[in-house]
Amino acid sequence: MPNAAINQFEMYFEDRGSGTPLLLLHGGLGIGRDWTHVFPSDPDGFRVIVPDLRGHGRSTNPGGTWTFRQCARDVLALFDWLQVVRTAAIGVSMGAKTLLHVATMRPEIVTAMVLVSAAPRFEEPLRTAAAAFSRESYERLPDDQKAALRARHAHGDRQTLALYDMTRSFASSTDDLAFTAANLSRVTARTLVVHGDRDPLYPVELAVELHRGIPQSALWVVPNAGHGPIFGPLARTFAAAAMNHLRRTEDGR
């Protein structure tokens, strides 16, 4: 699969099939291939575009800095590189927040999207969890957990430590994730907001806020579910609901 040389880094991505473009954005410390746990085979009728976001997996991040806005610019640069002008999209957690930036920066490019475990801003539960991602905490990980991270991120311990730095930065970040009603009103994509009602990082009220702020949106609160409620036993149900939403025509059929 190719790398795209964009925005002073190398973005690894997979580009498969034909039809309507479908962008899949993974979560923090994840990789694009995590989507195979939700979609064991690519949805019919879609050209599936699955990047490793900046600094994750096989993508590089030579500058060392990381923001959701920059990730959104990277996605837009990839689409320009691929000459894709319209897309459907699904993002989970970090990918969903990146997708929010994409959909407000260039609303015309996203026709329909699914936001899983997104939020308009960071609140205390997330900040507390993020602060624990120190380099020392990485060094204390059991060897099997370190090995699993090395298997996912191709550039070694230095890359994984940079991802820990990225996550820890969320504890003090105030302007990178700061969506207001005015920002959200710019979104023109038909949007499905998916959120676990027991998400320990983002209270469900934040999903309601997104739903109220995005003009053409629906809200699915998944009962008894935590953060990223799309994997394991929930995967098939989520995949069916997400594709039904993305395939729905403008008149609702």
Image (tube, helix red, strand yellow):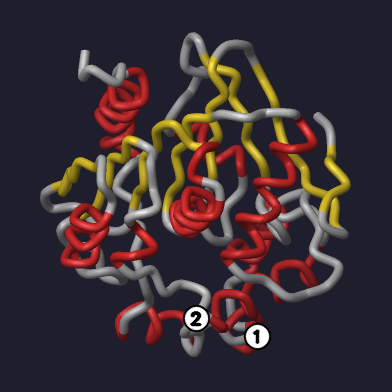
Splitting the image into 4 quarters, where does residue 167 fall? bottom right
Q: Name the element at disc 2.
A: loop
Of 99 and 203, the residue lying toward us: 99
Q: Depth-wise, is mark 2 or mark 1 nearer the camera?
A: 2
Splitting the image into 4 quarters, where does residue 202 fall? bottom left
**Answer yes or no: do the residues labelled 2 and 1 have beta carbons within 8 Å?**
no
- Marking on residue 175: 2
The residue type indicated by label 2 comes to Asp
- The residue at 57%/23% (across/down) is 21
Q: Is residue 80 left or right of residue 122?
A: right
> For mark 2, does the 10 Å Cα neighbourhood hold few (<14), some (14 to 19), or many (20 or more) residues?
few
Question: In the rendered view, would you say 84 is above or below 47?
Answer: below
Looking at the rendered image, the quarter that the C terminus falls into is: top left
How many marks are shown on the rendered structure? 2
x, y percent for residue 196: 21, 54
- Marking on residue 135: 1
x, y percent for residue 33: 60, 38
